[in-house]
């Protein structure tokens, strides 16, 4: 249904609609005309307010649940409120400090990103999400540490100080000298390259038969590059924290919706594809309920903001997933501030 322009509502309708939405977002409960009459000095009787609410329902902005005579905003109504009526509140000094401290104590980039989701989740009472940038760091050093006769620990050190450890199967009876030979070769030839570039360089050397490696050492190098490259491609690109926040006392009568949402959160790749829509923009994006097919069953909302890397390009997205009745005026600026903080960290 097309969203009714806010300009088409008269002042009385806007006031009633705003009060209904704000009350609903605060309590999660349908709002009756008598409640609205007590919220502000509208100089309207409950009967007049009921008539206005009826008009708003006919416009598709409010709905009446079967179990209550009160009204609640529809997804269309929430979209109108968020886009045209909401007054956002800047994060408090305490909230900013909690976000900055959590991210600063995260350490490595991946840990800082995870800390960002934890901070957002705790402050918003939603599930925190962050799309991890697909990084291909420059390589510095390689090593192989024998574990047993059949396996070794392949160690990759990046120029940014990151360390990756993977178990690799050994080809036949490999001596410690062979492990050192393979590691020294990789460190000498591939330092300063990305994994992708190292794989291309190795393939070219092997095809041209220019590699100084032979036998087991050569096979070991191929296996090391392959396992690191495969792992980088298949690594989850989404971190989700705080799913437990989605289950509280207020969800007792809405367990099916929560169950659907938790199922949707298991499909991280699907959510990652949804968030890719926020990568193209420079501002915070809000997806409300069935506006996105992924959350059509759970009726959930997503607030996501892009964060930038060292060259100013958007490299990832951070945000929250929660019920459509979340506090948009408070959470949207909070997500935006977290994205700004991550952007400063990435630089």
Image: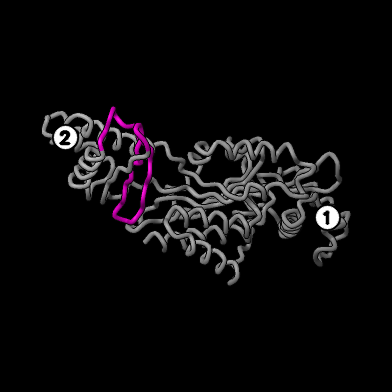
Residue named by callout 2: 213
Q: Which mark is residue 49?
A: 1
Q: Residue at x 86, y 46 (%)?
A: 69
Instruction: Name the foreground residue: 179 vs 195.
Output: 179
Q: Which mark is residue 280?
A: none
Q: Secondary structure at mark 1?
A: helix
**Residue 255, horizontal then vertical, whole percent:** 74, 39
Instruction: Name the foreground residue: 70 vs 152.
Output: 152
Instruction: Name the foreground residue: 282 vs 4.
Output: 282
**Residue 323, horizontal then vertical, whole percent:** 67, 47
Residue neighbourhood size for the residue with mark 1, other residues' Cα within 10 Å, grouped as few (<14), some (14–19), many (≥20): many
Is 309 above or below relative to 231? below
Residue neighbourhood size for the residue with mark 2, other residues' Cα within 10 Å, grouped as few (<14), some (14–19), many (≥20): some
Q: Earlier in the sequence, mark 2 or mark 1?
A: 1
Q: Quadrant of residue 46?
A: bottom right
Q: Is residue 325 magenta?
A: no
Q: Which residues are magenta?
A: 148-175
Task: Describe residue 313's horizontal placement relative to residue 58 as left or right.
Answer: left
């Amino acid at each position: 249904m097309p969203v009714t322009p806010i300009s088409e509502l008269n002042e009385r309708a806007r006031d009633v609609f705003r009060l209904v939405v704000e009350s609903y977002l605060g309590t999660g409960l349908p709002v009756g005309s008598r409640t609205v009459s007590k919220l502000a000095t509208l100089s309207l009787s409950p009967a007049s307010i009921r008539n206005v609410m009826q008009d708003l329902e006919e416009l598709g902005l409010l709905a009446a649940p079967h179990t209550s005579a009160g009204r609640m905003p529809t997804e269309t109504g929430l979209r109108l409120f968020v886009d045209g009526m909401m007054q956002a509140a800047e994060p408090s000094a305490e909230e900013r400090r909690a976000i900055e401290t959590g991210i600063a104590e995260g350490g490595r980039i991946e840990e800082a990103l995870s800390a960002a989701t934890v901070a957002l989740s705790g402050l918003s009472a939603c599930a925190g999400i962050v799309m991890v940038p697909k990084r291909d760091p420059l390589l510095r050093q390689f090593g192989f540490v024998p574990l047993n006769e059949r396996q070794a620990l392949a160690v990759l050190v990046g120029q940014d100080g990151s360390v990756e450890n993977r178990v690799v199967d050994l080809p036949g009876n490999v001596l410690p000298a062979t492990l050192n030979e393979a590691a020294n070769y990789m460190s000498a030839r591939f330092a300063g390259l990305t994994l992708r570039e190292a794989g291309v360089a190795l393939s070219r050397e092997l095809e041209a038969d220019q590699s100084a490696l032979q036998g087991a050492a050569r096979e070991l190098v191929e296996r090391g590059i392959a396992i690191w490259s495969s792992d980088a491609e298949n690594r989850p690109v989404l971190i989700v924290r705080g799913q437990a926040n989605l289950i509280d006392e207020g969800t007792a009568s809405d367990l099916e919706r929560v169950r659907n949402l938790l199922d949707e959160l298991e499909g991280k790749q699907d959510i990652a594809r949804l968030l890719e829509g926020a990568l193209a923009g420079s501002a915070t994006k809000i997806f409300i309920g069935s506006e996105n097919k992924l959350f059509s069953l759970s009726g959930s909302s997503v607030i996501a903001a892009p964060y930038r890397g060292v060259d100013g390009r958007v490299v990832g997205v951070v945000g929250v997933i929660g019920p459509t009745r979340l506090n948009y005026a408070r959470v949207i600026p909070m997500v935006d501030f977290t994205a700004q903080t991550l952007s400063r960290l990435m630089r």
